[in-house]
Image (cartoon, coloured by chain):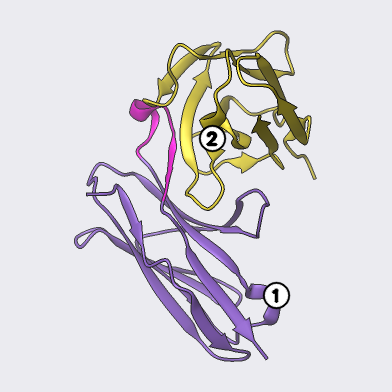
Amino acid sequence: EPEVTQTPSHQVTQMGQEVILRCVPISNHLYFYWYRQILGQKVEFLVSFYNNEISEKSEIFDDQFSVERPDGSNFTLKIRSTKLEDSAMYFCASSEAQGSAFFGQGTRLTVV
Amino acid sequence: RKEVEQDPGPFNVPEGATVAFNCTYSNSASQSFFWYRQDCRKEPKLLMSVYSSGNEDGRFTAQLNRASQYISLLIRDSKLSDSATYLCVVNRGKAAGNKLTFGGGTRVLVKP
């Protein structure tokens, strides 16, 4: 069964450093997303990406964040100058069309 | 008002019993609706889509009431493995970047 894969599964970084979270969406999917979930809180939308551009982003997704699809398979989230409050589980997701999405297993980011 | 609201629970359910819970959404432009399941520290997994006519998948029944803007999930003959957090999710379609908006989740604990 096709799945969304994310690497690394856990990333520890020092405050102020840059991190890149990587995702390989399901191959025939057209929409790609990043969500985050702070421990004990709800899943929050960050950004959606369609046709090689951002189609929607939330208030959380400020200039500190960027996304890229550097080749035909990878989809990355870059967080510049990380802050303690960026510590969360980051989920990548993809969907074939409008509707539901399939989620990767997540990257747990810990900023120290 | 939160866009998607759920009773956080927990709902303590004897094994074999039936449990039902609702979710309300605030945006009448929402186009598609889903229940996801999330186990502790894992990714959300699609449980089922929700249709206006109501739909069933084994022991799970979902209903959508567009007029009152609520969605329900009923679990019959509860199993221990049904213990999880159930996430109500709405999608406002392509105009909103096809993003999924999550409720805070309803925690269900099935006990022997």
Q: Which residues are magenta?
A: B92-102
> Magenta stretch: residue B12 in it?
no
Displayed quadrant of residue A88: top right
A96 or B99, nearer to the observer: B99
* SS at badge 2: strand
The residue identified by callout 2 is A35
Colour chosen for chain A: yellow
Q: Can you tell which mark lies on residue A104?
A: none
Q: Is residue B88 above or below residue B111?
A: above
Q: Is residue B29 above or below residue B46?
A: above
Q: Which chain is purple?
A: B
Q: Relative to A51, is A10 on the left or the right?
A: right
The residue identified by callout 1 is B81
Q: Residue at x 47, y 15 (%)?
A: A54
Q: Residue at x 66, y 82 (%)?
A: B79
Displayed quadrant of residue B53: bottom left
